[in-house]
Amino acid sequence: MFIEVLEILFLFLTAVMIVYLARHYIFTLTVLKNSRKKKANPSFESTIYRPTVSVLIPARNEERVIGRLLQRMTELTYPKDKLQVIVVDDASRDETGKIAEQYSKAYNYIKVVHRSEREGGRGKASALNAGLRCADGEIVLCFDADYYPQRDIVEKLVKEFADPKVGAVQGRVVVLNEPQNLVTRLVSLERIGGYRVDQEARDKLNLITQFGGTVGGFRRQLLEELGGWDEQMLAEDTDLTFRVYLAGYKVKYVLDAECYEEAVDSWRAYWKQRYRWAKGHMQCAFKHSLKLLKSDKLTCPQKIDGILLLNVYFMPIMVLISWIVGIPLFVLKFSQWLSPFWAAMLISFYSAVGNFAPFYEVGVGAYLDGRTHAQWLIPLLVFAFLYNIPICTKAFLDLLFSKVTGKVSNHWEKTTHFGNGNSYIMKSLNH
Amino acid sequence: MIPSPNLLSMITVFFGILFFLILTFLPSIIELKKPKDPGPRIIVEFDHTYLSDLEIEKNEEGELKANISILGEIMAILTFLPDLES
């Protein structure tokens, strides 16, 4: 009886992995198919749509990077009379506030909101809500302090709001400090898979396109109706994505609206960041799964994709359990009939490398970007995936512990940015 | 000494796994040792070009700079001409 339970569990886990495999395979084929087509010219694109825009920049101890972003804000091509930039100095202990103030004095459309030690340091969602209270643009965009966008990114993002069904937009993130070390190169590959293929395919297939928390934005009215960012959520971006869809709007992905980010550059920083993402995503899975299934505003494919997206951080745990269950079943030869499924098991595992964006997604993304040599690093993504197993397991156990005991521990582990990308920006601008 | 079939199969499996690992990770090791990838992708000002391409652009820019300096000299002559007339 015990062996049969293990066999059923093993088959269930393998089936789930194959579903994810099929999903990513469909995404990859969709993007490949669309890449050959000439870019369609939607009617909204020709419309000159210039709403007032508020750009929110939450910043906590970002003195090494905030200056370059604010400088970039002054170089944006969007009409300055329709632009408002709000820097939320979230109780910084360094020169962030002073740098922001200097820009505020020089440019009347840049405003600084200083938060005291008592108010600040409660996470990004809290800082963004503080910024939102001062925003008066029709559209609210967000950029992290370590980001560096294209000059015309605002035009590219806001034009999508001409469609009344669009409640939020998301642009593409590109890793700036990619050549720095192995971690940044692997993160860059993950980003290529995620943004060049995954997000693009979900947008094309009209599934759940994800707002990534930065390089994107919302209609202010909708954001206010939704109550702003949920400060209890660690993945406030995923949470808001689902609240937008449940409200009957959609998130539009804009592939050509690109922005640099400074990726984490050590395995320790990678752990902190992914732990926060994993725990936050799992919080969202508990919060939204049932609502998603019950919603009458979403299509059936959107519901399926939404459930798969919400539960994506459970995948490494599932792989771990399938090993724990599957290896004894195979080695001890308890189950002879199960052995053919090992092929499926291995395929599923291999497809799962690349931190939830399977290897062919990363490969095709790199191919479409013309990055043939970057593809050579794809096998190393298996180590990133293996590293994610303890991260996601710990995140799940901590979340479970807090659910059982009622002790909520949503401490925001902020990623430290060292300004390592500055040299790459200088290099490109000098040319 | 002829190895026992058991030992032989173990050696085969060992070298098989080793060969598989080398085959899988060799391209990655080569790329890490001598990176040929032109990343990061340049999105600012230069669409769909890479940092390494800039070396080539540098030469073209060099020529452009020369043209600009010639234009500057022409401008200087042109501004000087009215003075000659007077």
Image (cartoon, coloured by chain):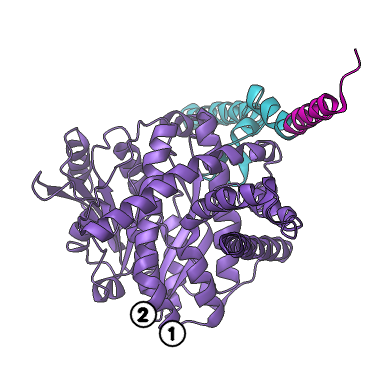
Chain colours: A purple, B cyan
Predominant SS of the magenta segment? helix
Q: Is residue A90 left or right of residue A400?
A: left
The stretch in magenta equals B1-23
Indicate the chain on which mark 2 is placed: A
**B4 inside magenta stretch:** yes
The answer to which of B68 and A307 lies nearer the viewer is A307
Q: How many marks?
A: 2
Percent position of residue B12, x then y: 83, 28
Q: Residue at x 62, y 48 (%)?
A: A328
* Vertical order, A255 against A294 (above or below): above
The answer to which of A222 and A334 lies nearer the viewer is A334
Indicate the chain on which mark 1 is placed: A
* Vertical order, B47 against A426 (above or below): below
Q: CA distance from mark 1 to mark 2?
A: 8 Å
Question: Does the CB distance between marks 1 and 2 fall below 8 Å?
Answer: yes
Q: Residue at x 43, y 87 (%)?
A: A296
Which element type, helix, strand or loop, lies under badge 1?
Answer: loop
Residue at the extreme right:
B2
Res A297 label: 1
Residue corresponding to mark 2: A247
